[in-house]
Image (cartoon, rainbow, N blue to C red):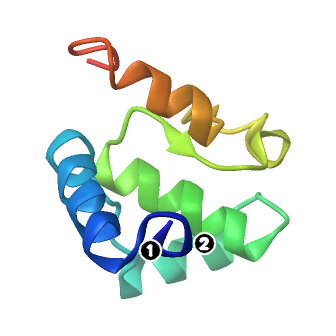
Amino acid sequence: MRRQTGSQKARELLSVLLERLQIASVTDSVIRAALQSSVSDFEDAVTVVAANAADVDVIVTRNISDFADVTVPAMLPQDFLATLTQPKALE
């Protein structure tokens, strides 16, 4: 984003996004649970476990097919951004 908009504008946009979404934390317990996960790709397992631990509504990813069989639905970034124009779209 910084390359397209510049550093200051990218920071401003990220600040606005952070008002509307939650970033799931990757902790020691998340990593340990991901190691035991049935999700075959470790990075995807970390994402799923972190999302579940944070009780998020959706995983935003460019590769939604990797998350087809998990408990938290996945959404493409452009589709997620479109929901931001709708008040409380994900609640």
Tag 2: amino acid: Ala
Mark 1–mark 2 CB contact (< 8 Å): yes
Per the image, label 2 sits on a secondary structure element best described as: helix
Tell me if residue 83 comes above or below residue 9 in the rendering. above
Q: Which residue is disc 2 drawn over?
A: 34
Question: In the visual, does 9 lie left or right of 32?
Answer: left
Mark 1 Cα within 10 Å, few/some/many (few <14, many 20+)? some
Q: x, y percentage for residue 18? A: 21, 53
What residue is drawn where x is 79% and y is 49%? 63
Q: Quadrant of the C terminus?
A: top left
Per the image, label 1 sits on a secondary structure element best described as: helix
Q: x, y percentage for residue 39? A: 77, 58
Closer to the camera, 51 or 76? 76
Residue 87, quarter of the rendered image:
top left
Q: Which residue is disc 1 drawn over?
A: 30
What residue is drawn where x is 60% and y is 34%? 78
Tell me if residue 56 comes above or below residue 80 in the rendering. below
Mark 2 Cα within 10 Å, few/some/many (few <14, many 20+)? many
Tell me if residue 45 comes above or below residue 42 in the rendering. above
Tag 1: amino acid: Val
What residue is drawn where x is 85% and y is 64%? 40
Closer to the camera, 57 or 38? 57
Q: Residue furthest bottom?
A: 28
Residue 22 is tagged as none
Tell me if residue 67 comes above or below residue 1 in the rendering. above
Q: x, y percentage for residue 89? A: 32, 14
